[in-house]
Amino acid sequence: MNDTSASPVVLGEADGESPVDSILKVLRLDTPVTSRDHTYITGRSISFPTRRVYGGQIIAQSVMAASKTVEPDRLPNSVHGYFITAGDINQDVLFDVENLRDGRSFSSRRVNVTQRDGAILTAIASFQKQGQSGVEFHDPMPEDVPAPETLASARELMAPYTSQSAFADYYVNQSPFDIRHVMPTVMLAADKDSAARDSGRQYVWMRASGHVDAPQVMHRALLALGCDQIMMEPVIRRAGLSFMTRGLSYASIDHSMWWYEDIDINEWHLYVQDTPVAAHGRGLADAKVYDADGTLVAVMAQEAMVRVPQDTSEHA
């Protein structure tokens, strides 16, 4: 790959550009170059408080890179990614898309994501021709969930802490999503009630914080990017921790996602999340995603490394 360096994209930094506009540019990637069964595409990274390549960005970019190699009537139906090592946000990212198979209804692609320092992620993405029929059912959306308009946004909750926390500054000034927790957020403090009940269950509303006018594949990729901002919260919640817990360390290990219906990222979606198990420094979380009409549009699961020192004092 090209030995190139690039400054990370600070979302919303360009004059007149919103964080949503910035993330759309990042996800569109560069012009593909094809050689035999491989297509090579270069992309940039967004600036993120960890100073590492954001996992949700890489998953979303992998979906977009793979989509450039399939017919337009085939949309992503699943992606399964395994994170290998942390990426450098100051280096360009190379997406090597391998054509595994094109069947009558499905196309399969392998995406290997690298930088000059080595591999970041390997993923398998599946695309399905639209209009296929078969069995249909889905779990109902929970009842009596407060409307998102009645809830405080993450931007409002984090605003008082922007000078103290890079993450708070990101949520207030750079996040391309409007995030609203039904349960008390674990961004700022532990949810002791949930921990006492041995529960990580939570409901979160989310939508784009600006208008997205883009093809359906982009809306699906944005759902993959957005969900990564909240996927590990059930593990932290059930463990009685918060993201302010002193010495807390976490990183995504793998991420799987299935789309069942079209996504409109401009509209509210409810994430119904939980965690079934945590052991050996790893925690597993899952989510069902419903649109505002109550249709189950996507399902996802993520495992992450979660490490906590003996002293779990809440604030650094």
Image (cartoon, helix red, strand yellow):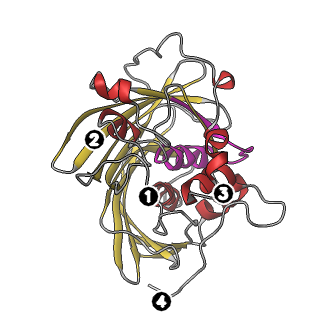
Q: Give the residue displayed 56% in from the left and 34% down from the top.
A: 262
Label 3 sits on residue: 24
Sequence-first tag of 4 and 3: 4
The image quarter in which residue 242 lies: top left
The image quarter in which residue 32 lies: bottom right
Question: Quick one: which residue is furthest to the bottom in this view?
Answer: 3
Q: Which residues are magenta?
A: 204-228
Could you say where residue 17 lies in the image, as x and y percent from the top left? 78, 59
- Identify the element where label 3 is drawn: helix
Label 2 sits on residue: 284
The image quarter in which residue 193 lies: top left
Could you say where residue 265 lies in the image, as x and y percent from the top left? 63, 39
Q: CA distance from mark 1 to mark 4?
A: 22 Å
Label 2 is placed on what type of residue? Leu
In the rendered image, residue 215 lying in the magenta stretch gets the answer yes
- Identify the element where label 2 is drawn: strand
Label 4 sits on residue: 3
Q: Give the residue displayed 77% in from the left and 67% down from the top.
A: 14
Q: Are marks 2 and 1 in contact (CB under 8 Å)?
A: no
- Identify the element where label 1 is drawn: helix
Total labels drawn? 4
Q: CA distance from mark 3 to mark 2?
A: 29 Å
Label 4 is placed on what type of residue? Asp
Sequence-first tag of 2 and 1: 1
311 or 18: which is nearer to us? 311
Q: From what the image shows, is residue 77 above or below residue 1?
A: above
Label 1 sits on residue: 55
**Disc nearest the viewer among 1 and 4:** 1
Sequence-first tag of 3 and 2: 3
201 or 245: which is nearer to us? 245
Q: CA distance from mark 4 to mark 2?
A: 36 Å
